[in-house]
Amino acid sequence: MIVVTLSKVPPSLRGDLTKWYQEIQTGVYVGNVSARIRDLLWERILKNIGSGEATMAYNAATELGYQFRTTRKDRQVVDYDGIPLMMQLKQQETPVEHGFSNAAKFHKGKIMSHQRMAKNQKKINLELSKPLVAIDLETTGLDSTKSRIISIGAVKRMPDGKILQFEKLIRSVDSVPEEITKLTGITLSKLQECGVELSVGLDELSDFIKDVVIVGYNFEFDEKFLTAALQKVGKHEFTNPTHDLMPIVKTAQEFLDNYRLMTVLKAYQIENLNPHHALSDARATLSLAEKLIKNGDFAI
């Protein structure tokens, strides 16, 4: 059980506490939360208390079975042989701070908050104005030493916001596994009819991405296949800066059921109408990168 009493505090702080505790009387809050939440709420009280006062009592392994904290300047919590006591001070420990009124402080804080928001928005707008390209591959399997690329999709955002798309089927294979066809819709006959040679596809991809920053989801997988393919046709590896969005999402979204692309896109409310299709997945990956930039979780 936790009991918090407040007096002369801002209404916003009282509103915060009602999310976790029940206000059984004006300024008296009762609840039962974990020690971590209790400590975080106390930190919030200390941060937002203004010129008011707060006292908190809670269960603890003491002789009395409870402990308490206070912000009162005329009282001090002391430990007397394991028993918490509230000692009255003869005078305030710290002098009264003189300065602006609460209204003036609130106004100043509001201005500073708006300035920070404007600064952050300017930074986000700058990030969103930078060119960026998302790449996704479809392959015949998971092993880059044995499997082959059968489709390349890339979507590039230009500095003016214009979106360019690149898509190539690669016909440098003798067969396509049945499970890959079911997943991607790509058949051997389609590759033979519409595909290009691997070296041609990689050259055209290189011309498309130029020196633009590359993003991908679980890009380590795609990068291994690109490296193996470039080596196979005797071409140099791409030197573009690259970012894998998966670890960024794992940091920003700690409680997802899993981190498959479809799950992540749903969490960020991004629609992918044709999953396991290189161009569609690349388009969704670019949207994910933009969301992460807007949220302040990713910078190019």
Image (spheres, helix red, strand yellow):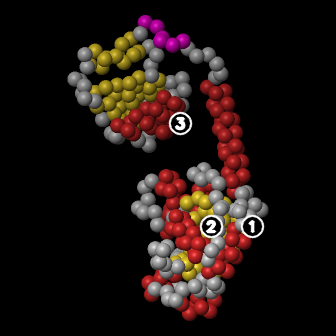
The residue depicted at 40 percent of the width and 34 percent of the height is: 39
Per the rendered image, the range of residues in magenta is 90-95
Q: Eyeballing the image, is 5 above or below 171? A: above
Q: Amino acid at mark 1?
A: Lys
Along the line of sight, which residue is nearer the eye, 23 or 153? Answer: 153
For residue 37, above or below residue 10: below
Foreground pick, 155 / 296: 155
Q: Secondary structure at mark 3?
A: helix
- Check disc 2 and report the residue beneath it: 237
Residue 281: image x %, image y %?
A: 57, 72
Kindly identify which residue carries mark 1: 162
Q: CA distance from mark 2 to mark 1?
A: 27 Å
Q: Which mark is residue 12?
A: 3
In the rendered structure, the answer to whether residue 135 lies left or right of residue 86 reads right
Q: Please report the residue visible at 71 percent of the width from the left and 53 percent of the height from the top.
A: 125
In this view of the protein, which residue sits in the foreground, 268 or 88? 268
In this view of the protein, can residue 135 be seen by the observer? yes
